[in-house]
Structure formats: structure tokens, C-alpha cells
Amino acid sequence: MSKQQTVSLETTARVRDHCLCLAAQRTARTLARRFDEAMRPLDLTSGQFSLLMSLNRRTPPSVGPVAALLAMDRTTVTANLKPLERRGLVETAIDPDDRRGRLLILTGAGRKLLAAALPIWKRTHAEVDRLLAPADAGALRAGLRLLT
């Protein structure tokens, strides 16, 4: 019988305390819950808010640029658009420059909901910034952008 390899408890503690990936995942989930709770009165999640905001452009984007901005794959963006389309917040249209492509259009209702959500986002974001006051939030944002 071969001897089973194990990872020491010290190594487990080191990973717990030093792993940037774990820290980022935990923080992302915590932030998402905070913003989800804040947006709940509008029946909107933090992810939906980000998706709607990504569509707020001069000209409607296709799925590719939205997926790139949100660091998602195209199929995930498409799946996340479905409930927003059912609510009448987003529409898709054929791209007149490439009939195979689809453009994502933020509807009037979508723009209205985004405008209602913005003060909630600002207030919640200010709360998070206050929690980060002992740290340099700008340096944190810059560091996170470097990783993306």
C-alpha cells in the first residue's frame, strides 16, 4: 500500500492567510452580497446592475465588448441578459453592419431602472469606501485593474 501524501496544517494556514485568489473570491462574494441587498428593493442584483451599466453607451454594443468589459464569456453574458430581456430592460437587435451579430439595447425602462439604482450604488459604494478608509482604496483599485 502506498503512503498517502498530505498537506500540512501549516501550509493550509499559509494558503488561507496569503492566497490572493482566495482573498479576492471572498471579498467579491462579500461585496456582491452587500450590493445585492442594497439593490433588492429594485429587484436587481449587483451583477444585473453592472450588466445594465455596461450597456449604457452612445451606441448599442454587441455581446463581445460587454463580455470583455465584465470579464465573462459570451454565453454567460447571453444567459444573464435573459431575465433583463423578460423584464423589458434590454432588447436585442440585428446588427445592420453584420446581420449575423446582435446589438444589445438598453430600453427606456432599463435606463429608468439604472437611474433609480445609481443613488443606491453611490450610497453603498461610499459605505465600502469608508470601510476601506484605513487602506488606500485607490491603490487597491489600481492593483486589481493590473490583474485584469
Image: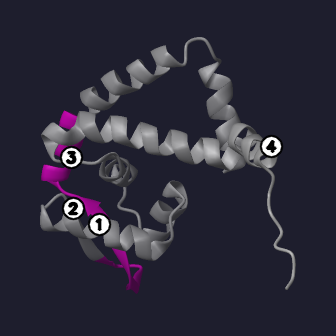
Expressed as whole percent of the image width and height from the top left, the position of residue 146 reads 72, 43
Q: Residue at x 52, y 55 (%)?
A: 69
Q: Quadrant of residue 104?
A: bottom left
Q: Quadrant of residue 105?
A: bottom left
- Is 144 left or right of 70, judged from the image as shown? right
Disc 3 or disc 2, which is closer to the eye? 2
Q: Which residues are magenta?
A: 94-117
**For numbered disc 3, what is the local secondary structure?**
helix
Disc 1 residue type?
Leu
Disc 4 or disc 2, which is closer to the eye? 4
- Above or below, 53 relative to 106: above
Residue matched to label 1: 81
**For numbered disc 2, what is the local secondary structure?**
helix
**For numbered disc 1, what is the local secondary structure?**
helix
CA distance separating discs 2 and 1: 5 Å
- Above or below, 102 relative to 24: below
Expressed as whole percent of the image width and height from the top left, the position of residue 9 reads 76, 47
Disc 2 residue type?
Leu
Q: Is residue 112 visible?
A: no
Disc 4 residue type?
Glu
Disc 1 or disc 4, which is closer to the eye? 4
- Which of 97/67 is in front? 67
Given contact means CB atoms under 8 Å apart, are the residues at marks 2 and 1 in contact?
yes
Residue matched to label 4: 10
Badge 3: few (under 14), some or many (20 or more) residues near its Cα, within 10 Å? some
Q: Residue at x 33, y 37 (%)?
A: 35
Expressed as whole percent of the image width and height from the top left, the position of residue 83 reads 21, 65
